Image (spheres, helix red, strand yellow):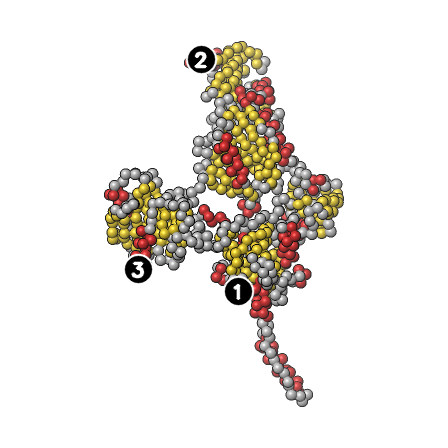
Amino acid sequence: MFNRKFCGEKFLHALVLSCLLIGAAPTLTLAAEADPVPAVIEKTTPSVVAIIGKPSSEEKTIDNNRFNLAHGTGVIVRSDGYIVTNAHVVKDMRNIIVVTSEGKSYSGKTTHFDEESDLALVKIEATGLPAATFASASDIQVGQSVIAIGTPLSFALRNSVTVGIISGMDRSVQSQYQLIQTDAAINPGNSGGALVNMKGQVVGINTLKYVSVGVDGLGFAIPVNTVQYVLDQFFKYGKVKRPYLGLELEESWESVVGLPSGDGLKVSYVQPDSPAAKAEIKKGDILLSVGNAAVSNLVDYNETLKNYLPGQSAALKLQTASGIVQRDVTFEEDPAGASQAGPDQDGAYIDSDQGKTRIGDSHYGWSMNYPSGLVKAKQSDSGDSISFGDSKGEFAIIISVSEKQSEDLSPYGLLQKLTGYATDTVLEKQYVDTAPHPYAKLIGKTDSDGYYQVRAFLNKDRIYYVTLYVDKEENYQNPAKQNSYNDLLDTFQLSFDAEDNLLKDVSVYQNKNTVTTEYGLSLDVPGEWTPSSLSADLSYTSQDGNRSITLRVTSASSGDTLKEWASRQELKFKNSYVEQYREVSGLKETTAAGVPAYVNRFSSTMGDKWTTRHVVYFLKDKYKYRLEISFPKDTNADEAETLVADTLKSLSFNKESLNKMLGFIQDDDDLVDASKSYTYNNATYKYSLRVPEIWFSGGYDQDGAPDSQVKTFSFFGGSFTVEADDRTSLEDALKKTSQSYKKNAEEDADYRYTETDEELLGGAAKKYSLTYKSKNVPYTQTEYVFSRGGITYTVRYKINEAVKTEEAVKRINDCLESMRFLPPKSGITP
C-alpha cells in the first residue's frame, strides 16, 4: 500500500542532503495534501434530494398505517424543480415529499415515468434550485474514484455518502441498457441518487433494482448517456419514444452466459403488420447489425436503438437461409415500451392520517380513539382481527370479531366466552353494565409477569373482543399509564360514523380480489368467487357455478394476426352448434389492458339454459390472451354489463409479474384438424377403429387396461362406445337390450324408440334408435347389437341435438364404418 508519510520523509531527507552537498540551505515548505472528497460532497450534495411517500398499494393492506412509508433519492436536473429518480422508487408511491439537503420540504408529483430505463421525473414547485452537472460519457473510466450520495435504509440517514471506484462499464444485469458497476456501497433507499466523480459531475444514477440481496461491494448505476437520452425525450415529447421493429430476438448461448459472441440475434417471432414483417424478415433469420452497429446481445441491440426515433429508417444486415441480406426498415413507435404516467397523487401531505383522531372498521361497525403513537401492526385478510402497537413499544391492543354467535347471551354467557382468555393469575372478572353497550371484563397476569385486559361486547350475532397487553411491570404498575390505557379502552364503541371526517376507516372488506397471473396480466374477480380446478386455464367461478371468468394464454404463431385468430375462434364456435342453438354478435374492435383487441359475444344452449360468453382477444408481445366472461343469458342486463365492464377495466400488464421461465405455449387450435383420425386396436376383443383425433379417449378404460371390454370415446356433446362380450350369446344380448328399451318406454311416454334389422359391416345387426330429452336436453342415441367371430358387440353413440351438425354426424358414421374385425390368432406349429 502506498504510504504518503514514509515516502515524504525519504524525499525530505534526500533533498536536505543534496542541498548540503552543494552548499545551499534548503528553503522547502511542505503543505499537507488536501483530501478532495469533502469539497466534492460540498459541491454536489445540494443537488441531491431525499424522496419519501406512501406506498400506493397500502390502502387496503395490513401495513395501512401512518408509519408505513417508502423512500428513495433524487437528483435535481433543472433549477425549476425537476428531479430525476428511479422509476421503481416512485412507481407505487403517493403523497410524495421531497426534502432538500438544507432540510426544506416540498410536495412532489411524478410527471414522467419510464420503466424500461428505470427513470422518472418528480416535479416540485420551486425555483433557483442547484441543478446537477453531468459528466461526459467519454470521460468515464474503470478505476475512476466515485462518490454515491443517497438515503440508505432509513429516511433519517438522508444525504449519506459512500466512496468507491467504478468497477466496470457496459454491464448488463437484468437491464435493457448498459449499467455502471461500482463498489461504492448502495443500499435500499440509495436508488435514484447520484454517483459523482471527483469533479462533482454526475456519472450515473444509482439503482438497487439490479442487485441481489446479500451481495456486498456490487452496486450499479444507470450511466449518464442513458440518463440524458431519457431526460431529453421526457422534455421534448413528454415520454420516451422508442423505435419498434416488431421482433422477438433470442441471444446465443455465449451471450447468455457472458462470453464474447459474434453470432448475432436469432429472430424467434415476427409481429404481424410490423416494420419487420413488412421488410420480409422471417422467423429463424439472424440479425447481425442495425445500421453500422453490430449486435450480439439484447443490450447491444437496445443501446443501438437509442440512436433512432420512430419514423426514421435503418439498414438491417441479416443472415437468412439464402445468405446474408440487407433489409431497409422504417421504425414505428413501440406501443409496449411507451412511458407511463405517474401514479395519481392522493393528498398533499405524507401523513394520510393527518387530522384523524378516531379509527374504526366500517364493515364490522366499531371505532375507538386514535392516538398519534398508535401503529396498526397486523390485520387478517377479512378484517375480523386487527392488532395495534404503541410506537414506543409499551402496549398492544387486539380487536377481534366472532360472527354468527347467539344474539341472546346473558351476562353469565358472555363472561363464559372469556374463559379461554384466562391465563395464570386472574385479577378481575366481572360484567360491566354500562350504557349503551355493557361488556364482560377479564384482567390477569401471565407467568412472564405480563398484564392483560380483555373486554367482550355483544352486538346482535357478533362478539367483539378488545384485548390490551402490557409486558413491562413498570408500565402497568404506573397509575398514570394504567389510567391512559383504560381511557383508551373506554373509547371503544360499537358504531362507525361514515360522516365523521376525523374517523379513519381500516376496513379491508372488499367485493373483489385482484388476481395477478404469471403471464404478466392482472385482473379483478368478484370477492366471493373461487378458483376452478375443472379447467387447465386460469378460471374463477361464482358460488352457484353459473358465472365464470377464464383466461387462456398461448403463444402466437409468427405472421398470424389478431383478427385472423379471433375470426377462427368465431368459425370454430359456429361449427360446433346447430344454428338454432347458437347466437353470435360478431367481431368488434376494442382495447384491453391498453392494447388493441377484438371482442365477440357467443350465446349457446344444449336445449335447456342459454349461456352467454363475452370473449376478448388480444396480443401482447408474442402471446395470445383469450379472456372469457360467462354468465346466464337471462342475467339482468345491468348486472351482466357491470361484470364485463369491471373485469375489462381492471386489466393491466405488469412485467414484474411475468414468469421468467415462460416459454412457448402451443395453441392446440392452431394444430387441430377435425378430419384427422388414428387407428385404435383392441387385440383382446379383436376389432379396430379409425377414431377422430378431436375425440377424447383418456388412454385406459374402466378396468385400467388399454384393451378393456368397454371402450368409450367422448366428444363435445356426445360419446361413442364399443362393448365386446365373448361370454354372452347374441340372442341373450338382444333379449336384454330389447327388454331395457321396452321397459323405459312403458315407464315414460316420451321415451320413443324404434327397433329394426339392419345390414352393418358385412353382416346382420339389430338397430335401436332413440330420441329423448334428459333434464330437458334433447339427444339422439343409436345402438347396434351384432356378433362377429364369436364375440357379441354393442356399438352405441349418443349426441346432443344442439351439436348434431353435419360434420359431427359424418365423424360418427366414418368411425362406425371404419370398424374392422381381427382374425383369431392362428396356432403355431412346431
- Residue extending farthest to the top is 757
- Residue extending farthest to the bottom is 23
Q: Are marks 2 and 1 in contact (CB under 8 Å)?
A: no
Of the residues under marks 1 and 3, which one precedes in the sequence?
1
Q: Residues within 10 Å of mark 3 (few under 14, many from 20)?
A: few
Tell me the residue that label 2 is attached to.
749
Image height of 696 relative to 180, above or below: above
Residue drawn at the location 59% of the way across and 41% of the way down: 594
**Considering depth in this image, is 118 or 572 the residue closer to the camera?**
118
**Considering depth in this image, is 729 or 203 the residue closer to the camera?**
203
Residue 569 x %, y %: 60, 30
Amino acid at dot 3? Ala
Q: Nearer the viewer, mark 2 or mark 3?
A: 3
Residue 56 x %, y %: 50, 49
The image quarter containing residue 436 is: top left
Tell me the residue that label 1 is attached to.
102
Amino acid at dot 2? Ala
Tell me the residue that label 3 is attached to.
480
Residue drawn at the location 58% of the way across and 31% of the way down: 600
Residue 700 x %, y %: 51, 28
**Considering depth in this image, is 341 or 623 the residue closer to the camera?**
341
Q: Residues within 10 Å of mark 1 (few under 14, many from 20)?
A: few
Q: Residues within 10 Å of mark 2 (few under 14, many from 20)?
A: few
For the C terminus, the quadrant is top right
Q: Is residue 86 visible?
A: no
**Considering depth in this image, is 620 or 7 the residue closer to the camera?**
620
